[in-house]
Amino acid sequence: MYAACSRWDDAAKMRSLMKSNQVKKFSACSWMEIDGKVHKFTADDKTHPESEVIYLELNRLLRRLEEAGFSLDKSLALHKVDKYRKLHSNCYHSEKLALAFALVRKPHGMAPIRIIKNPGL
């Protein structure tokens, strides 16, 4: 909440307090099933065996969006970081990685793409 109000000092104090009290935040993740196998993605994740292809596809999609006139709302990145890092954090969310993977792996016209966000949390 502090970050959303640009109260960066208060946000930093809260993060420090959480760390000193060993409060853990679960990483958001997205899951999907393709060909009977479940695939899990987290933000900025490069552990997937096909991560190189996934990132190529996602970057291709981002370029097409930009060419069509779409621009990301950088105000949604709730950390005090430079513009590049805000853009990066908005581009590589787990669900976007899962979508790019599905577009690479599923033939066009196949069943709908289903991405499950934070299952079990």
Image (spheres, rainbow, N blue to C red):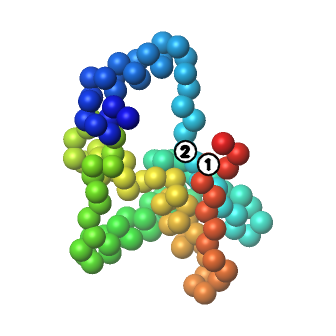
Position of 60 compared to 39: left or right?
left
Question: In which quadrant of the rendered image does the N terminus lie?
Answer: top left
Q: Residue at x 74, y 61 (%)?
A: 37
Q: Residue at x 44, y 16 (%)?
A: 17
Q: Nearer the viewer, residue 56 or 97?
A: 97
Q: x and y percent of residue 14 in the render?
A: 40, 21
Question: In which quadrant of the rendered image does the C terminus lie?
Answer: top right
Q: x and y percent of residue 78 in the render?
A: 34, 40
Q: x and y percent of residue 25 in the render?
A: 54, 31
Q: What residue is pinned by disc 1?
A: 118
How far apart, in angstroms, are the residues tagged by discs 2 and 1?
6 Å
| Residue contact at pointers 2 and 1, CB within 8 angstroms | yes
Q: What residue is pinned by disc 2?
A: 28
Q: Residue at x 39, y 71 (%)?
A: 61
Q: Nearer the viewer, residue 1 or 71?
A: 1
The amino acid marked with disc number 2 is Ala
- For marks 2 and 1, the one nearer the N-term is 2
The amino acid marked with disc number 1 is Asn
Image disc number at residue 39? none
Residue 100 visible at all: yes
Position of 117 compared to 17: left or right?
right
Q: Nearer the viewer, residue 77 or 35?
A: 77
